[in-house]
Amino acid sequence: MQDRIREILSWYGSDNPGTLTNLARLLNHGALGGTGKLVILPVDQGVEHGPGRSFAPNPPAYDPRYHFELAIDAGLSAYAAPLGFLEASARDYAGDLPLILKLNNRENLHSDADPTQSLTGSIAAALRLGCVGIGYTVYPGSALRQEMYEKLQVLAEEAKRYGLVVVVWSYPRGTDLSKEGETALDVTAYAAQIAAQLGAHVIKVKPPTAHIEQDEARKAYADVSAGTLAECVSHVVQSAFNGRRVVIFSGGPAKGEEEIIEEITGIRDGGGFGSIIGRNAFQRERGQALDLLQRIVGIYADKQ
């Protein structure tokens, strides 16, 4: 095992050998295996946004097998999806790549100013499907955040007891946050800290901007460098136990390839541990998606 992976595992001293083994499986898999960097394919958008909005731009993506094969052929670190997509094909690709079961999801047929998510999977299902971990979304800032935090704590405790890795999607939303505030530097850093405090091994947040949302935080942030994406990312990583938790960044809405590459470069230069790229990969034609993912992997491999 590479020294970098041993170092990362040492940050999780309270975890049992089963959890550390699954975390090592995640960190040692794919083209970035052994580097401490991750690129994960998440496909929960069929529930989150609907099948047409998610898969019509690239119709082969309606098939659950498509996403397994895309992640495998691109040499990605893992594949994360809700129960249905994993159940549809996990047997066919057993052992081919690490899987993460997304335990909660929300549909987009009702507008929620203060959103929450429904529990749509279980620890038992994650174990049955051979997953290395579970995924769970929280919305810091939502009026329903306490319920989400409490459910996560219970699920995280159970997951760790059975040797699973806990991956937390920490996305600030709610009536007291502006749209710009959802990715503000102070709010994104806060979201990363909350996920770490709730027991996450891996934390997923959105790429931060230099905007400061909270008036109370402006004085504290007066001396925090935030002139570039790399500087913003560095602060968010620092906010997750001074970089001793694995923080990865979402790919966000569909965008042009060069814009994606610029963003990935900024994340890498800021010390981010990697990316979790969904729509920007599977909505492209397969050849184009593979080329893009290989470029992204190459960027993270270039600077260790």
Image (spheres, rainbow, N blue to C red):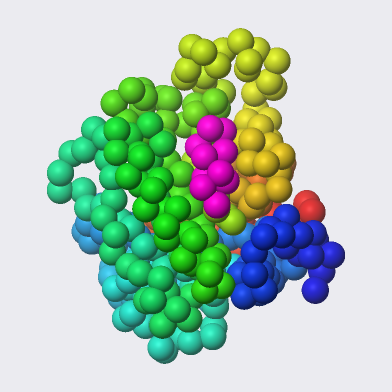
Side of 118 where 72 appears, left or right = right
Residue 183's place in the image compared with 204, above or below, is: above
Q: Residue at x 55, y 53 (%)?
A: 200
Side of 14 where 101 appears, left or right = left
- Between 160 and 134, the residue placed more toward the observer is 160
Pinpoint residue 132: horizontal percent, then vertical percent. 53, 73
Answer whether residue 208 is magenta in the image: no
Q: Residue at x 46, y 44 (%)?
A: 170
For residue 144, what is the image quadrant? Answer: top left
Q: Residue at x 33, y 58 (%)?
A: 104
- Between 207 and 126, the residue placed more toward the observer is 126
Residue 282's place in the image compared with 163, above or below, is: above
Answer whether residue 194 is magenta in the image: yes
Pinpoint residue 65: horizontal percent, then vertical percent. 37, 79
Pinpoint residue 6: horizontal percent, then vertical percent. 79, 65
Which image quarter is the N terminus in?
bottom right
For residue 119, what is the image quadrant? Answer: bottom left
Pinpoint residue 181: horizontal percent, then vertical percent. 43, 25
Which image quarter is the C terminus in?
bottom right
**Number of numbered discs on residues:** 0
Query: Can residue 61 be seen here?
Result: no
Q: Which residue occupies the extreme left position in the image?
A: 109
Side of 55 where 258 appears, left or right = right
Q: Main secondary structure of the magenta part?
A: helix
Residue 9's place in the image compared with 67, above or below, is: above
Query: Can residue 105 be seen here?
Result: yes
Q: Residue at x 47, y 19 (%)?
A: 213
For the record, the magenta segment spans: 189-199
Q: Which residue occupies the extreme right position in the image?
A: 3
For residue 135, what is the image quadrant? Answer: bottom left
